[in-house]
Amino acid sequence: MAIKHFLQFSDFTLDEFEYLFERAHLIKRKFKNYEPHHTLLDRTLVMVFEKNSTRTRLSFEAGMHQLGGAAIYLNTRDSQLGRGEPVEDAAQVMSRMCDIIMIRTFGQDIIDRFAANSRVPVINGLTNEHHPCQVLADVFTYIEHRGSIVGKTVAWIGDANNMLYSWLQAAQVFGFHVNVSTPKGYDIDPSLVTANKSRYTVFGDPSDACVGADLVTTDVWTSMGFEAENAARLQAFDGWIVDSAKMRCAHPDALFMHCLPAHRGEEVAAEVIDGPQSVVWDEAENRLHVQKALLEYLVLGRLT
Ligand code: CP
Ligand code: NVA
């Protein structure tokens, strides 16, 4: 039987996400009550990081521990990946020693090649093109605060990056709409969009994209791996800050989300990220709960 991976948001069906969210609710409740939930006793997660991380590392490592298993951290600096060992060989070896693997890397092709050579499930912990675990937590967070996301409007204010492509895939699976406003030169690459065109609308003016939105979200102006473009981006993104004027264009009970880390005064004003509409800390915490559900599902399948 083919191994199930989570390399892009579109790898799972709506039915699978609904199951994951049900488990995540249960797992979160048990965590809050200090009730043990050791469904992955004696199982091992290997985490490979080729880029920095705080939340992804912490949530996967703590999550695996809370499920009764162990997590091993590898990075490019001190593993043989940093000395040119082919990803195909690394996948063969790692997947013979553990039950599941999470990777944060550069191109999506790297994780695809890794997964093709792995005997165990592989999770995308962020690539240049996708960040499905974050959007999994974000959709769960929206539903926790506001109920169903079906038919709602998400405003994306920022460049066409990994977060946006995962949001567009989520829109297709769940049935919501994304209003996208990217600065000139940082717009959507159609070859990376799998969602139907009816699922999103592109706006030249970021304030227009916020009109009627139920959720406004943004991200750093310079994603990891694009640091050389930082100065040019600072200029091009002038006007793309999510401030209270833009939030006023949105629905009065709109939420604000940011995957973090954030830069106050660049992509978001302090009054927004630290204001009453912001749910950024819930988003971060929910990484833990939804990923525990994801780990459990990929290793064990559905539990009744
Ligand atoms: N949001 C997120 O993935 O954070 P880290 O880069 O800290 O893992
Ligand atoms: N788009 C950002 C997300 C960080 C969690 C990046 O890729 O750096």
Image (cartoon, grey):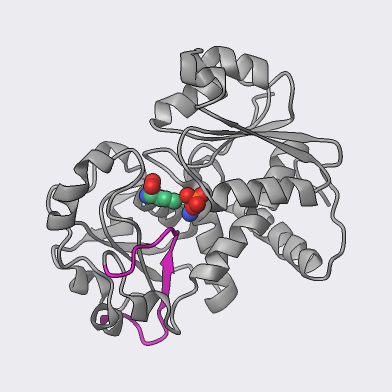
In this view, the residue in front, 272 or 82, is 82
Quarter of the image for the N terminus: give it.
top right
- Percent x, y of residue 133: 54, 49
- Percent x, y of residue 67: 80, 49
Q: Residue at point 35% right, 81% down? A: 271
Secondary structure character of the magenta stretch overall:
loop
In this view, the residue in front, 273 or 256, is 273
- Percent x, y of residue 31: 78, 64
In the rendered image, residue 91 lying in the magenta stretch gets the answer no
Q: Residue at point 72% right, 18% down? A: 96
Magenta part of the protein: which range?
249-265
Task: Report whether residue 174 is seen.
Answer: yes
Task: Report whether residue 186 is seen.
Answer: no
Q: Residue at point 67% right, 58% down? A: 289
Query: Looking at the image, is 38 positioned above or below residue 251?
Result: above
Q: Is residue 59 left or right of residue 249?
A: right
Q: Is residue 72 left or right of residue 169?
A: right
Q: Is residue 251 left or right of residue 232?
A: right
Q: Residue furthest bottom?
A: 252
